[in-house]
Image (cartoon, rainbow, N blue to C red):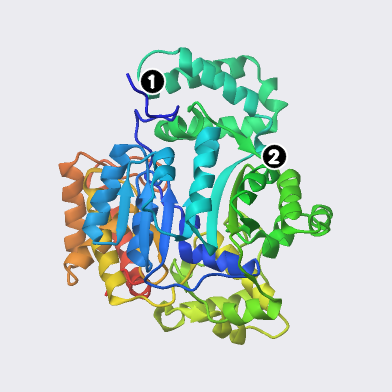
Amino acid sequence: MIDWSDGYHTEALYTYGYYKELSPSLQKLAVLLAGYEPLPSSDDDVHMELGFGQGISINIHAASQAGRYIGNDFNPSHVAHAQWLAQAAHTHIELSDDSFAQMDARTDLPMCNSISLHGIWSWINDENRQHIINIIQKHLKPGGIVYNSYNSISGHAGFLPWRHMMWQHFQQQTGTALERIGHTIEHFSAMFEKNPTLLANNPVLKSTWERIQAADRHYLLHEYFNANWDCFSLSQVNEQMQSAKLQFVGTTASNAYINHLAMDENRLAQVQAQPNVLAAESWRDALLGNTFRQDLYIKGGEALSQPGILRRLQQVHFVCSVEASNFGNFLFSTQDSRHFNADLFDPVKALLVADNYAPKSFAQIQAAVDSKYSWQHILQLLLLKIHVGQLQPCVAAASDQTRQQCHDLNLALLGKMDDKVSGVYVASPVTGMALTLEFIYAWALRTWLLKPAASLDDIAENIWQGLQTHNQVLIDENGNKLVSREEHMQLIHSKLAQAQSLRALWQALGLLP
């Protein structure tokens, strides 16, 4: 039998995920903040995603941002799903089940504004990594962007030998791939229970093992149980990227602007003492034990001064992706006890939610804040709100075409709710990115897209009937499964009341007309 998988699992499909770091518009903002002039956007842009999985990200970006999109994933089931979404949205997108070797051999691929790969580099072999370098070398425009994410050796060193033993044990089991994962987890759980000091003395192993035990088995299959699971330092990856004439410029998180919020003074001093961004990021990985890198490279590119960055940044617009009550004053998470100064945060929030959440430019936000705060202070706030999913940068302008494509794609994505009770990704033509909506909110949005005058009572009854048809139940905020109609309707109506208040935000994001 011919094995076309190159050691990567194809027995169970990859999970349905959206990754904002693959957004061309977000990449351009990060490149701008790194001090480089990104290529201007146009309908002639070409963006390539290598290894797109179920195709959620590439379809959302193709529907919501200008240009032509090209992608591959060698699992034909993934490609079939991605093509179904593309057909529903009527987008300019070309999807294939070519391998990286086949993509490398193609002579018909155009020059690209960006080439992106998320979670691919660590899970393929050296031969395929070289094919990717070849593709970049041949098909990236001067001034083009490359995004690459992978496992960082700094945060995984203590887990590497254990992952290898888990892989070996998995290989020796019988049954389906998911059954073999179950046997492997049971075996190592029993072993760690008998030898608790193994976890106590290895915090990296302990935190990773806790994540493994809680994770979905389909995710684990693709994350940890492939033939390849490699970790790299930034300098190792950079050396390979340099062979394709690429220059490392930073990360999609724009760490240089927020390092002082993530590190204590001593570690920050060590990072800031480095002569360039490559050395600074390498030290950051080591000092923080970073487990995953999300890197940006540029091929050539015009360097900008700080005033040049600011002039371009002032034209960028931002919009809330959550309603006002959820736009919270915290840094990295709701559990973070640290907050921004009120005289910085409050006027920014007030402006962003004003006029029914209409997008605001950076220049407008600057004007709303006390002049004692620099533009970097304001940018830090916005970057952290983007990081936690409460804010998104906007694309230059949402055309009628992108609005229609997003409408059609969203109906297709929302239509998949009928047989599962889970969150749904939807595309915003205003930001060129996705939002995640929980089940009841998503059902309300779908109903209003199809029947704008539908009442909350009608929507609630439809949700209940849908749950009954598919033998599904909802879970309350305490994790308890609901049983009766009365319990369900109480929860549904409380959520729908909140959904009603979200309509202004959804209109600002272009989800509703």
Task: State the image coordinates of residue 245 (x, y, percent, origin top left).
Answer: 61, 55
Residue at image x 63%, y 83%?
369
Task: State the image coordinates of residue 341 (x, y, percent, origin top left).
Answer: 68, 72
State the residue in front, 471 or 278: 278
Number of other residues with Cα within 10 Å of mark 2, as a class: few under 14, some 14 to 19, many 20 or more? many
Q: Which quadrant would the N terminus be assigned to in this image? A: top left
- The answer to whether the residue labelled 2 contacts the one labelled 1, judged by CB atoms less than 8 Å apart, is no
- Is 261 situated above or below 243? below
Residue that numbered label 1 is attached to: 179
Residue at image x 50%, y 44%?
132
Residue 100 has which mark? none
Left or right: 174 in relation to 114: left
Residue at image x 22%, y 57%?
88
Which of marks 1 and 2 precedes in the sequence?
2
Task: State the image coordinates of residue 191 (x, y, percent, origin top left).
Answer: 59, 15
Residue that numbered label 2 is attached to: 154
Where residue 54 sits, quadrant-wise, is top left
Residue at image x 17%, y 72%?
453
Left or right: 353 in relation to 254: left
Secondary structure of residue under mark 2: helix
Amino acid type of the residue tagged 2 in the rendering = Ser
> Can see residue 249?
yes
- Is 185 situated above or below 254? above
Task: State the image coordinates of residue 487 (x, y, percent, origin top left).
Answer: 27, 48
Amino acid type of the residue tagged 1 in the rendering = Glu
